[in-house]
Image (cartoon, helix red, strand yellow):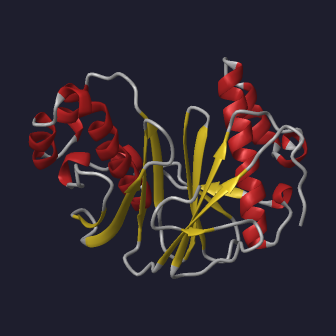
Amino acid sequence: MTITGFTPLNTQNCILNESRVDLWQFSLQHELNVSYQLLSVDEKARGDRFYFSRHRRRFTTARTALRIILGRYLNTAPERLEFTYSSHGKPAVINSQKLQFNISHTGDLALLAIGKGHPLGVDVEHYSARPYEGIAKTLFSVQEFEEFKKVPTKLKPAVFFHVWAQKEAFIKACGLGLSYPTKEFTVPTTMPTKQLVKDPLHKITWQLRSFMPGVACSGALCYHPTIRELRHGLLQLQPNFILRY
């Protein structure tokens, strides 16, 4: 089902556009038979370092899906893509025609955002038990924390992860990750939302869009304000997934 406010997307219209961001959603539940032939030696080694099999499966399936989808946009065989990483760990494809992308996953649910020319960030969070107020006091802005304290106890998980998904998407778009002082900017605590948010560190403004990609789950997308269209597609991944171009 397409997220409200997004245009439907499928694998036949993977075309980069500077005024559009595409959001792909897929499951990491299955190991893919094509992973071995598509992943690099380094990616296979990284996968093998995971102690638990479910973590290894999620990593290898996410990287395989990433290669498959990006390969479609770039009209390049997935196994031929080469990645480079910023000092803060944000990946990019070498010689990629202004391609911008960001990936996030929580449990077996993954989201991949793709655009052209402008940085972007995406995050997804499943609700889970946390010392909500303690974390919020440390990482939320003063305004966010004051609003969060007023939230009824039964709604705190939803509001907490709604705020945190937006903040994660924001700092990922900035390319700084958790080195960005998260108390220095404020995102909406009501949901779902679409709102301009100021970046005090870089003196620019970002567009933040929040949504629920699943049950008990918060997602957020951060992108340039000139973006005019958001598209959402579901990629069905089964163990015997066949790559077709």
The quarter of the displayed image where residue 96 is located = bottom right
Q: Relative to 17, does residue 168 appear above or below in the rendering?
A: above
Looking at the image, which residue is at 74% across and 37% down? 60
Relative horizontal placement of residue 176, taking residue 187 as reference (left or right): right
Left or right: 1, with 10 as reference point: left
Q: Residue at x 38, y 61 (%)?
A: 209
Give the position of the C terminus as an image quadrant.
Answer: bottom right
Residue 85 x/y as whole percent: 59, 54
Q: Is residue 210 left or right of residue 203?
A: right
Residue at point 11%, 48% (across, down): 143
Q: Quadrant of residue 142?
A: top left
Is 51 in front, or is 166? 166
How many marks the image carries: the answer is 0
| Farthest-out residue, top | 51
Q: In terms of depth relative to the viewer, which is nearer, 61 or 242?
A: 242
- The image quadrant that residue 216 belongs to is top left
From the viewer's side, name the closer residue of 46 and 24: 24
Relative to 212, does residue 193 appear above or below in the rendering? below
Position of the N terminus by quadrant:
bottom right
Determine the residue positioned at 34% across, 46% down.
Answer: 179
* Vertical relation: 111 (above or below) 136: below
Question: Residue 68's spot in the image, x, y percent?
Answer: 78, 56
Left or right: residue 196 versus residue 211 is: left
